[in-house]
Amino acid sequence: MTSPGELRRRTLETLTRQSYSLSRPDMVLLNDNVNLFGTNPAVAEVAERFDFSRLWAYPNENSDALRSRIASEFGVSPDEVVVGNGSDELIDMASKCFLNPGDKFCSPVPTFGMYRFYARVNLATVREILLKPDFSVDADALLAEDAKLTTVCQPNNPTGNLFERGAVARILSDSSGVVVLDEAYAEFCGSDMRREVMSSSCAMSMRTFSKAYGLAGIRAGFAVARKEVVDEIRRVRTPFGLNSFTEAVAMKALDHGKWVQETVSRMKAERSYLDGRLKALGFRTLPSDCNFLPAKCPVKGPPLVVALKERGVAVRDCSMFPLMEDFIRVTVGPRPMMDRLLAELEPIVQGGRA
């Protein structure tokens, strides 16, 4: 009898996804870059009045109410908005829509690994351009690849930095293919390149409710682009992509801008605190425009990550990324979480130096 493994695409032989499973239910999760300062109040408000008895019915096919609310918030037309189950689905949709087998996909590295994942799933030829030693983007090298689809994370994960605006604007304006600008962390630094995206004939800006909005559990994201780009993306979007409750919560979350601003302010204060404490332990931190802090360990990074996990604290091991050997990435959270991390780190670092 033929096995499923014998029937799968040959291109998937070496394709693996990051595992998000953790063995301890009480693990302090500092590895996912979510908003650790709490769940958006929109969830409780919507739950109080949501008609759960109507969940037998399909949701709106294209999430029209949410698209209209996003359009109002960001000063565009509803026809210039497409929604998905987080940014991940939007990346997948862009890859399905624009990449034929063998077409060239390009992104800077190090960056969010799911860009490459979806490009490979959709049979693209992957080209990756190393960031410069100061972690700035090499716009000339990126444009020279003449890729069918290019992704740029602004600010960038996992390096945490905001790329120079002019360099990103040139990638958007001069690329011969489609450019996906991932602005998932924009709320943490006030960045907004919507004007440059809308000035480009083949570009889209992705946003998410999973980060600053504190709603990673409901899975909602959206992209803003010219209508002609959105029309193409919607060709591959599955109908009823967002469930009814998710759509209602996401709409309400846009009314809670003050809550987002307050949690971002708290995060920045804790990021500064964590930065100083990590430096005192011998870590070399990178300047961050995001809700996480990249730091080069004073000891070997991968064993440190394992030791922390055994002590109930999860951080992201970045050693697999180019330019980031022995780096970890720590999501910034409330002071008790930061102090727990620091308390567990100190004996590990001291033991590694002995």
Image (spheres, rainbow, N blue to C red):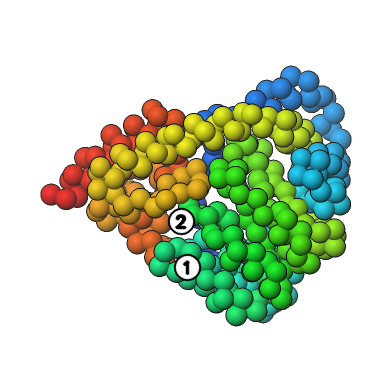
Mark seen at residue 316: none
Residue that sits furthest to the left in the current view: 354
Lower sequence index among marks 1 and 2: 1
Residue 125 appearing in the image: no
Q: Which residue, given by chain and number where applicable, does mark 1 sit on?
A: 131
Residue 351: % across, % down: 17, 46
Above or below: residue 233 compared with residue 71:
below
Camera-side residue: 126 or 290?
A: 290
Q: Which residue is rendered at x = 31% and y = 52% of the image?
A: 284
Residue that sits furthest to the top in the current view: 48
Camera-side residue: 273 or 12?
A: 273
Above or below: residue 349 compared with residue 137:
above
Above or below: residue 66 compared with residue 322:
above
User: Is residue 4 rendered to the left or right of residue 22?
Assistant: right
Q: Which residue is rendered at x = 55% and y = 61% of the image?
A: 164
Residue 290 appearing in the image: yes
Mark 1, Cα crowd under 10 Å, few <14 / some 14-19 / many 20+, is many
Q: Are marks 1 and 2 in contact (CB under 8 Å)?
A: yes
Real-space Cα separation, disc 1 to disc 2, in angstroms:
10 Å
Above or below: residue 28 compared with residue 53:
below
Camera-side residue: 31 or 294?
A: 294
State which quadrant residue 154 falls in. Answer: bottom right
Residue 246: % across, % down: 73, 36
Q: Which residue, given by chain and number where applicable, does mark 2 sit on?
A: 159
Provide the secondary structure element on which disc 1 rests: loop
User: Is residue 207 rendered to the left or right of residue 275?
Assistant: right
**Residue type pointed to by label 1:** Leu
**Residue type pointed to by label 2:** Thr
